[in-house]
Amino acid sequence: MNTQLEKGWVINVISLASAVALVVALMPSIAGAVTFLDTLNLVNTVLGALIPIAISLALVVFFFGLVKYIFKLGNEDQQKEAMRLMIWGVIAIFVMVSIWGIIGLLQNTFKVTSKDPIIPRAIQLGRTFQ
């Protein structure tokens, strides 16, 4: 019981340290954003960069499950675990692509015009916020 309490405490400290490190790392960018629209533009850019990474991660999980399933053909338990990985990968991809579709539908419904495509831009180094 005492060991579980110590593990929980360590995990909480690590989580708190990670959150503080993230805030400290983003502080110069947030401080450089002069207006609220600049801050929103910064958040939009960060999220636009994270979406392709998340989809890529979901694809990696799916293909990892597929390879694991193929190589563990004789073992039922490991096949079920591999199948579970593939299902979660497909669910993640479906949810992310569906959200893109819903955003596109809302943009067309409410006549939100933008020159930027719905598909997020790749990470662009040296890009300035306008």
Image: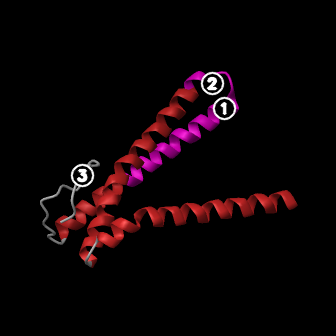
Q: Does 60 sit above or below residue 100? A: above
Q: Nearer the viewer, residue 40 or 30?
A: 30
The residue pinned by badge 1 equals 78
Identified by mark 2, the residue type is Lys
The Cα atoms of the two marked residues, 2 and 3, are separated by 45 Å
Q: Residue flagged by tag 3: what amino acid is it? A: Gly
Closer to the chain start, of discs 2 and 3, is 2
1 and 2 marks in contact (CB < 8 Å): yes
Residue 114 in picture, x, y percent from top left? 14, 63
Depth order, front residue of 113/18: 18
Q: Earlier in the sequence, mark 1 or mark 2?
A: 2
What residue do we see at 63% from left, 37% from top?
81
Q: Between residues 102 and 20, which one lies in front from this camera angle?
A: 20
Which is more N-terminal, label 1 or label 3? Answer: 1
Looking at the figure, which quarter contains the C terminus?
bottom left
Q: Considering the numbered disc 3 on the image, is that residue within a helix, a strand or a loop?
A: loop
Identified at 46% across, 37% down, the residue is: 60
* Number of marks drawn: 3
Residue placed furthest toward the right: 1
> Which class describes the residues within 10 Å of circle 1: few (<14), some (14-19), or many (20+)?
some
Identified at 66% across, 63% down, the residue is 13
Q: Mark 1: which amino acid? A: Gln
Residue 126 is marked as: 3
Q: In the rendering, at what x and y percent does residue 123 appear?
A: 29, 49
Image quadrant containing the N terminus: bottom right
The reply to whether discs 3 and 1 touch (Cβ–Cβ < 8 Å) is: no
Residue 72: mark? 2
In the image, the segment drawn in magenta is 70-96
87 relative to 79, above or below: below
